[in-house]
């Protein structure tokens, strides 16, 4: 079926049998929730659609639905995600296995509907598994896997996954869809008995009243331990999904030609395909280039990535995001896992294209600096004079 | 009709909770749960009622309590309902229980959304007329003249009329109540239970530390609020206003006690000058004049 990334998410959520969808529209996420509203209205998906009045309410409703045993989904973007943030933490700290698609968009001002990853990354301490999709097919596959990951008894944490605005959300490609029966075999019904919080008058509990300093750390440590188990859960789910779909799946990250690389570029999201093309071009020129495409950002696969590229001559990290007063977020996170610096390229903010040529240029730049023994530093790639 | 005889003897909100002595809101939650019964899920935002539940792992609640974020009560209730429906879990009542700040201020957007969708739950705002949890800051439900820590010379603006805002949503049922009249309150919950859609009850809930009166005077103060006409007990349904309880006999000014009796019993009004007291009395009289017109329009004005 030819689907945009957005519609791929909708169909993934449908075949995953989400039971409650509470969502609020924002460009460029709207197609996701419009399609779901339509599928529910037509009876193709047996679910309740709550037409909430804000993203804050969307997540509050999703949390409450999970607390009452229903599989819940929402989707948002940029301002919607920022507006929702209080409840994003509520879901993460409360261990409610909600899943959410985030279409990555720049935060204003000035207003912009174009692609940037800062919105998603700004939520990285909220106790959510965070993934980035790189194709419409992967958006479909991730929408399904996200529920399995979130609901896994070893984890029980919410999962959000990003789709680059327009280049993924609105770009149509052929997406292989799975039969309902196949997905039903992969994703069992949500079992309330396994939920950490279940609102049941026959077994009444109070969720979320006060907790003093004497036990809060222990609670938080349980979540930390869940995230220690998360990489294994994500890898296992990806492997099982590979089997049912016949499509080999990446769990935490893709390693593209890094085994013998002298320069490795690390990227996330839809443009990582272009980065791989750039690596091919470099190899045609005799430069051994490779790409690591991070799929998981939380848990951050730093150790696993270090094992693959820890020894290469130069590592270039591309950030379509920024933490002001610190630097590119992925570059910063990765350097904390590696010995020696990484060459950090801030690029594509506000939706500016990052071309194959740009990726080639970054790898060339990183490698030549490394060969000259120059210190790694941050470069704002393609920065122009303001008019 | 709920009477002392048929009000459930079961307790779903147990003693030993962390409320202040004389707290009307916890007493009213106890009454509400007696009417709603054991098959009820309650969602509560940040407010005194989240604190009075005390420290995990203990809880005074014998029905499920889902605490949520300050602004999120009505959205949380909507999520509960959606799940119950899709899961086919029938016969469970849903209660949103929030303070005046969580209702009139930060939570009004979610409440308005749920009201427009006419979600099938009961929302009770217990109105202690300030942000008590955080130490008595002024809210939009703080009445004119009342001193709070952020209206230090007495609030200049009038109290926001949330019941009227809810009536404008044309939901099936809107009522006011006062914690000093638990049976009137209980009866309104019973009625609300018989209707489908969003039912809103706005409960005046005297608060000894916040209003500055001795803890043993909670009921007395609540009764004065009604007998002076400062607080009107009524119901609204299908376009009609109906007075209930003591308020039924208070349409005439002569039947109402002077407002001063209510004001002077509370420290929060102690800064009021004679003039300001007079102005507040006029507010009450105007409020009744307007309300009487509504009763006439409803065809529910008391005769004679
Ligand atoms: C988003 C957010 N802002 C502020 C607070 C702090 N806060 C917690 S309870 C509260 C006051 C609650 O007032 P009200 O709803 O009237 O209930 P009361 O405490 O008076 O019973 C405030 C301001 C919060 N928890 N969350
Ligand atoms: S401050 Fe007022 S409302 Fe809060 S617990 Fe004490 S008496 Fe009750
Ligand atoms: Mg209050």
Image (spheres, rainbow, N blue to C red):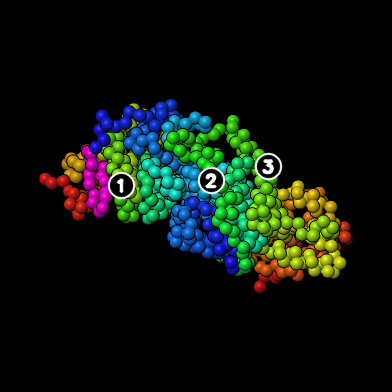
Q: Marks 2 and 3: CB-CB under 8 Å?
A: no
Q: Nearer the viewer, residue A109 or B262?
A: A109
Q: Nearer the viewer, residue A224 or B55?
A: A224
Residue A134, how many percent across, how many down? 66, 61
Which quadrant would the N terminus of chain A be assigned to in this image? Answer: bottom right
Q: SS at mark 1?
A: loop
Determine if marks 3 and 1 fall on one subunit: no
Q: Chain of mark 3?
A: A
Give the residue number, with chain letter if any, for mark 3. A228
* Residue at image location 52% in from the left, 53% down from the top: A17
Magenta-colored stretch includes residue B215: no
Kindly report the distance in space between the C-alpha atoms of the residues bearing marks 3 and 1: 49 Å
Residue stretch in magenta: B227-247
Q: Earlier in the sequence, mark 2 or mark 3?
A: 2
Q: Nearer the viewer, residue B203 or B29?
A: B29
Q: Is residue B24 visible?
A: no
Q: Label 1: how many residues lie within 10 Å, few (<14), some (14-19) or many (20+)? A: some
Q: Chain of mark 1?
A: B
Kindly report the distance in space between the C-alpha atoms of the residues bearing marks 2 and 3: 23 Å
Give the residue number, with chain letter if any, for mark 1. B195
When asked about the image quadrant of residue B101, the answer is: top left
Residue B90, how many percent across, how many down? 39, 43
Q: SS at mark 3?
A: helix
Residue A317, how many percent across, how many down? 75, 58
Residue A190 got which mark?
A: 2
Residue A179, how many percent across, how many down? 57, 58
Above/below status of A150 relative to A205: below
Q: Judge left or right: residue B200 versus residue A369.
A: left
């Amino acid at each position: 079926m030819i689907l945009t990334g957005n519609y791929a998410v909708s169909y993934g959520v449908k075949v995953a049998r989400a039971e409650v969808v509470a969502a609020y529209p924002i460009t460029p996420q709207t197609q996701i929730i419009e399609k779901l509203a339509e599928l529910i209205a037509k009876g193709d998906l047996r679910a309740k659609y709550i037409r909430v009045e804000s993203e804050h309410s969307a997540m509050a409703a999703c949390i409450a639905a999970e607390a009452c045993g229903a599989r819940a989904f929402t989707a948002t973007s940029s301002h919607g995600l920022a507006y929702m943030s209080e409840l994003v933490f509520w879901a993460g700290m409360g261990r409610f296995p909600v899943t959410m698609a985030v279409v990555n968009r720049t935060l204003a001002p000035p207003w912009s509907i174009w692609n940037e990853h800062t919105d998603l990354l700004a939520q990285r301490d909220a106790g959510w598994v965070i993934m980035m999709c790189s194709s419409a097919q992967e958006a479909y596959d991730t929408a399904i896997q996200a529920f399995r990951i979130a609901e896994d008894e070893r984890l029980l944490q919410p999962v959000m996954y990003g789709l680059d605005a327009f280049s993924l959300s609105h770009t149509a490609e052929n997406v292989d869809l799975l039969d309902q029966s196949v997905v039903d075999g992969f994703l069992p019904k949500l079992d309330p008995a396994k939920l950490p919080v279940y609102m049941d008058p026959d077994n009444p509990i109070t969720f979320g009243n006060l907790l003093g300093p004497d036990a809060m750390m222990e609670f938080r440590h349980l979540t930390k331990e869940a995230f220690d188990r998360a990489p294994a859960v994500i890898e296992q789910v990806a492997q099982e999904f590979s089997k049912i779909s016949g499509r080999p799946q990446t769990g935490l990250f893709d390693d593209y030609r890094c085994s013998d690389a002298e320069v490795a570029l690390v990227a996330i999201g839809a443009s990582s395909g272009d980065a791989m093309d750039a690596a091919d071009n470099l190899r045609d020129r005799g430069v051994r280039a490779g790409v690591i495409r991070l799929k998981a950002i939380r848990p951050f696969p730093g150790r696993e990535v270090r094992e693959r590229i820890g020894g290469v001559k130069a590592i270039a990290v591309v950030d379509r995001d920024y933490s002001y007063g610190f630097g590119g977020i992925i570059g910063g996170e990765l350097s904390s896992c590696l010995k020696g610096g990484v060459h950090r390229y801030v690029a594509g903010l506000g939706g500016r294209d990052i071309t194959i040529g740009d990726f080639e240029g970054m790898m060339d730049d990183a490698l030549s600096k490394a060969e000259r023994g120059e210190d790694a530093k941050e470069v704002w790639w393609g920065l122009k004079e303001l008019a | 009709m709920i009477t002392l005889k048929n009000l459930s003897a079961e307790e779903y909100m147990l003693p030993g909770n962390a409320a202040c002595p004389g707290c009307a809101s916890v007493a009213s939650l106890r009454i509400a749960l007696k009417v709603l019964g054991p098959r009820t899920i309650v969602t509560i935002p940040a407010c005194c009622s989240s604190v009075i539940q005390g420290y995990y792992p203990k809880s005074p609640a014998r029905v499920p309590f889902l605490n949520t974020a300050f602004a999120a009560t009505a959205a949380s209730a909507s999520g509960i309902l959606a799940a119950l429906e899709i899961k086919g879990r029938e016969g469970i009542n849903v209660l949103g229980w929030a303070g005046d700040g969580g209702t009139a201020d930060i939570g009004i957007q979610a409440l308005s959304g749920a009201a427009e969708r006419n979600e099938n739950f009961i929302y009770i705002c217990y109105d202690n007329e300030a942000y008590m949890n955080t130490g008595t800051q002024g809210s939009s439900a703080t009445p004119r003249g009342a001193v709070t820590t952020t209206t230090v010379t007495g609030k200049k603006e009038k109290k926001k009329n949330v019941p009227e805002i809810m009536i404008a949503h044309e939901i099936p049922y809107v009522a006011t109540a006062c914690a000093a009249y638990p049976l009137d309150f209980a009866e309104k919950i019973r009625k609300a239970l018989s209707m489908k859609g969003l039912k809103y009850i706005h409960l005046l809930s005297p608060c000894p530390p916040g209003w500055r009166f001795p803890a043993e005077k909670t009921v007395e103060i609540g009764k004065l609020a009604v007998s002076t006409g400062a607080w009107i007990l009524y119901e609204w349904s299908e376009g009609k206003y109906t007075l209930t309880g003591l308020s039924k006999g208070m349409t005439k000014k002569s039947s109402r006690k002077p407002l001063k009796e209510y004001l002077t019993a509370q420290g929060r009004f102690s800064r009021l000058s004679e003039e300001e007291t007079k102005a507040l009395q006029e507010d009450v009289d105007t409020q009744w004049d307007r309300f009487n017109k509504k009763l006439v329009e409803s065809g529910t004005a008391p005769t004679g």
